[in-house]
Every structure is written in structure tokens, then in C-alpha cells.
Image (tube, rainbow, N blue to C red):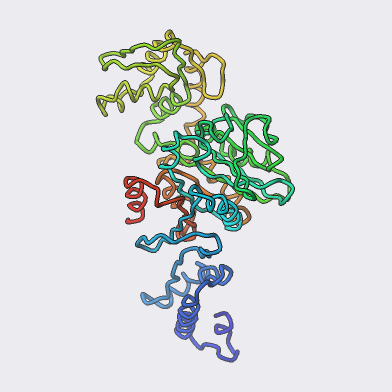
Amino acid sequence: VRAAAAPGMDGGCESLVDLKDDFLGLSSRWTARSGAPDEYDMEKQYDASTAASSSSMLGQDSLKVVQRPVIVDADEYHMKQLPLSGDMCIFDINLHDGVAARQNVERYYAMCKEKLGLHVTTSCFTTWRKSKKTNGHAKVIPVHPADTEAVRVFFFDDNLEWGGHEESSGICNLRDSSTGEFVNFAEGENGFKRDRAARHTVIYHSDHYRTVLVKANILDAMEDTEYFSSIVERFSSPGEKFLIFMDVNSTIVCNDTIQGKDLGSTLLSTMFEFVNLRPREGFDFVFDDSPSIRIEKPENLKSLVKRITAHSHEAYGSFWTEDRCWQLFAALADLGEVTWSGSEDNFDLDDCQTLFKEYLISLGRAISKDGIAPSWFTVFDKLKGEHSVHLNSFGVDTRKVILATVPDELQALQVTVNYELWDARDVQKFEGQFQN
């Protein structure tokens, strides 16, 4: 196109109309070819400023650059394309079923590592649920021995648990990509050490596998715009490539903001998710005029509020005031041990009220209407183009983040895990998000 546009050259065009015709012809011939490499993507060669200039001179019939899905060789990674309608190309990979699943861990690792930018993996919730939500059937996070290549893997998720064994309760299915075997990440195993960041974030990291597991805290993520970036910088070394897996809900997105709560209500409901009650013994509990509930095992206060107000959606929505929250906190504190998530220290009402006031000030400028933490955009801006970032979720909360982060969602690779094992409800929700 550039040659055609140059005056005086053989085959050169005499007008913008000729240029348009030449461009469209070249574009149609090229897009007809199978497996055209990314570096020859016409979208990249024909930048937006040129398009805007040509459009103003060519009128309504101006050329339009066609957006095409990201290119991937499904056979190379042993994936199959799902027969879903629309422009989105979605690929499925087996990471749970049989011997092939272990072999596919290495292929999945290679694909995730090689595809720069932002992509999505929707993991198989059905397998995890049926296996009593243990690590060995959870989100597959592929890692590699440190002495083989300089790739550091980060996994940010608010639901990480630190039992670390394959049969332990948890959401991290950490796998050695060279063998497919589970990697025990309990403290002291495979080089894993415990650390902390920000106010409430717990981190387990290993130099044996160049792996950093982060139990993310949405309050920390909302408060500090450098939250994710500072963790990546602190636990990495010069010259490394980063492969980052990022959960969505309560890791980079505060759902209560999306549901329309004001700042105070959003903060109270979010904080109560991190406040845990360990009852001294089982008891029946009545709060105000709500029906009685039975409390027998450790549970966070937000979960208790949901059970207390289960009889009325309006009751739950109107619950989140300071008076009612402090009243509930005080009542429960007399019946068990109250702690903050990730800590064994006693967490009393004064601690909670003080923390609430501090966050109310610091988060005043951070809450956005879509609930996405500013620190997410900060870290992605620093990583894009050189590193690989994969949203990894059990739900359909990823598309909103994709649309808010990149200009063209078709350039984000969509991968599902063991789609044939999903239950009908999850399939319906997943396919429904691409129909609009």
C-alpha cells in the first residue's frame, strides 16, 4: 500500500480512490489466506490516523479495517474450536480428563506464555465443585522449573488457601508443565515461603519454580493504584518474562459497586467478607426480626448477613448501614472469636470501625461505576506488549474487564477448560454473554 501510494513509482496510484481500490484488493487477498501471521495484520499496518484521514476525503464509502479474531493454531496446542455463533473464536482444552490432560498442561503453558497481551481462560467450575473444591481440580496454573527458562508465573486470586496439597481445600491447581504433576505449595515445600504486601495481602513464592501466589485483597487493590505493579516488581528479577493469571471477582472487580451501593455500603459489605467468626460452639442466632439461623462452623460476616436476610432481597439491600453492621458485629463477638482474613489475631469492633474510617477516606477517589480497581489498569499498561496476562475465572465476569481494557476484544484469546463437562446453567450463561 505504501508503495502504491508513492508518486512516480511503478504501479503507483494517482488518487486516493485508486489507493482505496488497491488497499481493498490487497486486504481481501490477504485475509483469504489461512494462518496469516500477526505481524502482517492489516489492522496493524493501517493505523487509525491514516484511516480517519482517508475517511474524511473518501466520504461515506470510505474503507473500513475489518477486525479479525486473534490467530491461534488449535492443533498445535491440542485445542478444539467451539461451534458458537458470532465473530468470537473460542477454543476448548482438556486439562482435567485422563492422561491427555497432563500432557496438555505443557501445551497450555506454551500457549499462555507465547500469546502476549490480554487473554481469557474460563475454568471448569463443575469439576471443582464435584471434587469438593479441592486444589487438584481447581484452576490449572502451569509453572516450570526455574532452571529451564526465565519465566515467572504470578497467580492473583482472593480465594487462595494455604494448605497447599492436591487434596487440600483451595482454588489453585498448580501443575509442573513438564510433567503434569501437582506442585505442593505449602510453606516449606518446593521452596515456597510466606510473605505479605499492602495491608492485608498474603503471598507465597518460590524461586524453585519462579512462582508467586497472591491471595489478593480487593480493598488493597482499590486503595493503591500501584498494588499489582508493586507486587510484580518486588517478586521478579531483571530479564524475566511474566506470565500472569488474574482472577476477576473480588480480585480486580468490586461487585458491590456494580450493584449500585454507595461508598459506605460498598465498603461495609466488602469488609464483612474479610471478617471471620469462629463460634465456640454451635448456636441458634436471631438478629432483629429476622428468622433464626444456625451457626456451627467458621463463616465470614457477609455470608452470615446473606443468611440472616435470605427471606427478603430488600432486607439484604437495606442492611448495609453503619448502625446495623456495628450492632451485628457486637452481638456475634460475644459468641465466638472474630478475626480478619489471613490473621489469627483478635479483631474487635474498635479495630473494624477504625479500619472503616481509614478506607472511607482512601477509597473515596478509587471507586468507579464499573467496580474495576484502578490498579488493574496500571499493571496492564506496564505489561502489555511484552508480557502475557490471562484472566482466569469460573464465571462470566471477564468480558466486562476485556471491554474496559483493550480496544478490540477479538484480539483476546478465549479458552474454555473441559467445556463438555460444564453443567447446562454455566453453558447458557457463557454463551449468552456473546449474543449481545
Q: Nearer the viewer, residue 345 or 43?
A: 345
Q: Quadrant of residue 284?
A: top left
In which quadrant is the C terminus drawn?
bottom left
Instruction: Name the side, left or right, on which 385 lies relative to 410.
Output: right
Q: Residue at x 60, y 90 (%)?
A: 8
Q: How many marks?
A: 0
104 and 18: which is toward the camera: 104
Which residue is located at x 44 percent, y 13 percent? 279
Residue at horizontal 27%, vertical 29%?
A: 313
Image location (x, y in percent) of residue 170: 51, 33
Tell me residue 318's x, y (percent): 30, 25
| Residue 416, position as x, y percentages in the image | 45, 52
Question: Can you tell which quarter of the image residue 258 is in?
Answer: top left
What residue occupies the far front of the structure in this picture?
99
- Taking the view exactly as shown, the residue that stands out farthest to the bottom is 10
User: Residue pushed farthest top?
Assistant: 334
The picture places residue 264, in percent across and down from the top left corner, at 41, 26
Q: Which image quarter: residue 304? A: top left
- Position of residue 197 in the picture relative to residue 279 (left or right): right
Q: Is residue 328 above or below residue 187?
A: above
Taking 183 as reference, is 133 left or right?
left
Above or below, 305 against 78 in this view is: above
Residue drawn at x 57%, y 29% as measured from the top left: 163
Query: Image height check: is 328 above or below 217?
Result: above
Q: Quadrant of the N terminus?
A: bottom right
